[in-house]
Amino acid sequence: MAPTPDGIEVAGVYRETPGGPEGVHDPRSVAVSPDGRHLYLAAGSEWSGPAGTVAGFARAAGSGDLTFLSLFRGPPPAWSSYPPSPPPLVQIDTGAAYTNSRKVTITLTGGYGQGSLLGEVQLSNDGGFARARIFPRAPSRYSWLLDSTGPERLSKAVYVREGSATGGAFSGGPIAADDIILDEADPRVLATRRTRAGRRLKVRAADGLSGVNRVQLALKGRRHGGWKVYRPRAGYPVGRSKVRVRVRDRAGNVSRWRSVRAVGGRVPRQR
């Protein structure tokens, strides 16, 4: 830069190119020798990457033009000989395969962890970290909102990287991710059939995404029982009285109750 009556202006630009000046990328500080004949440029990462450098330039008298002379590379820090820390293990809802809610909890285990120079963590539903959010790395659990359901059978992924945000930009390490299937649709009871003189009930149900895995029965005049394993080919003991039945899928969605008349009734009805 050069002074002008109105302030300063650019006097020259030096770029790090093959065969040209070295040590120009990622500058940290500049110093001029007391006699004004040399300029020294310190560059390099603060906590990771290659060792820092100091580039030496000859400075022309009068014009101040610079000529690259040499590059000094500092020794790597002692801790750089250790293998890099792996990215954290990411789990959505403690590793569940399905969920029926966009609101989930992200848990991080391992990685650089608390108290590291990577003081923040970046989360996104997009692998390119579009619409990402930055959180302090101090906790290990974060509340998160998945993208809307979108195409069926498409799992929802959450991407995570540790790092630090400076100047509005986030500089992060390796990317880790986990995925989960978001199932917001309720299963359906398709049909019921009594067997063994009406004392057992077979249930056929369907779910388009996570699949049916539980069935619940409520006999006439009684509160419903606990959830039973859904076995479409097996029958459940219900006696000959009226019974209600509903099912649940692996994501936790529950169907509507379906009423089945007592033996001798006409057509089962659904409500």
Image: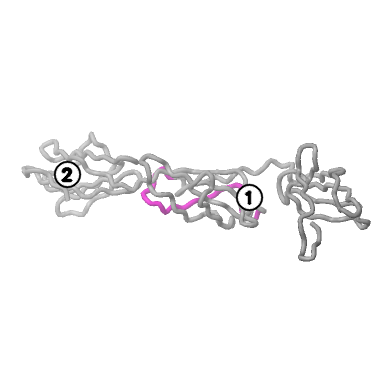
Range of residues picked out in magenta: 96-116
Judging from the image, what secondary structure is the residue with disc 2 in? loop
Residue 44 vertical position relative to residue 232 in the rendered view, above or below: below
Q: Amino acid at mark 2?
A: Val
Write the residue at 80% across / 37% down. Answer: 19
| Residue holding disc 2 | 238
The answer to whether residue 80 is left or right of residue 63 is left
Give coordinates of residue 79: x percent, y percent.
74, 46
Residue 102 colored magenta? yes
The answer to whether residue 265 is left or right of residue 142 is left
Give coordinates of residue 104: x percent, y percent.
44, 52
Q: Count residues near mark 2 (Cα–Cα under 10 Å), then give few for <14, some for 14-19, many for 20+.
A: some
Q: Amino acid at mark 1?
A: Ser
Label disc, if present, on residue 171 of the rendered structure? 1
The answer to whether residue 207 is left or right of residue 146 is left
Extreme residue in the front direction = 5
Q: Nearer the viewer, residue 202 or 147?
A: 147
Position of the N terminus by quadrant: bottom right
Sequence order check: which comes first, mark 2 or mark 1?
A: 1
Q: Count residues near mark 1 (Cα–Cα under 10 Å), then give few for <14, some for 14-19, many for 20+.
A: some
Query: How far apart are the alpha carbons under marks 2 and 1?
Result: 62 Å
Give coordinates of residue 33: x percent, y percent.
90, 55
Write the residue at 6% across / 43% down. Answer: 266
Residue 182 colored magenta? no
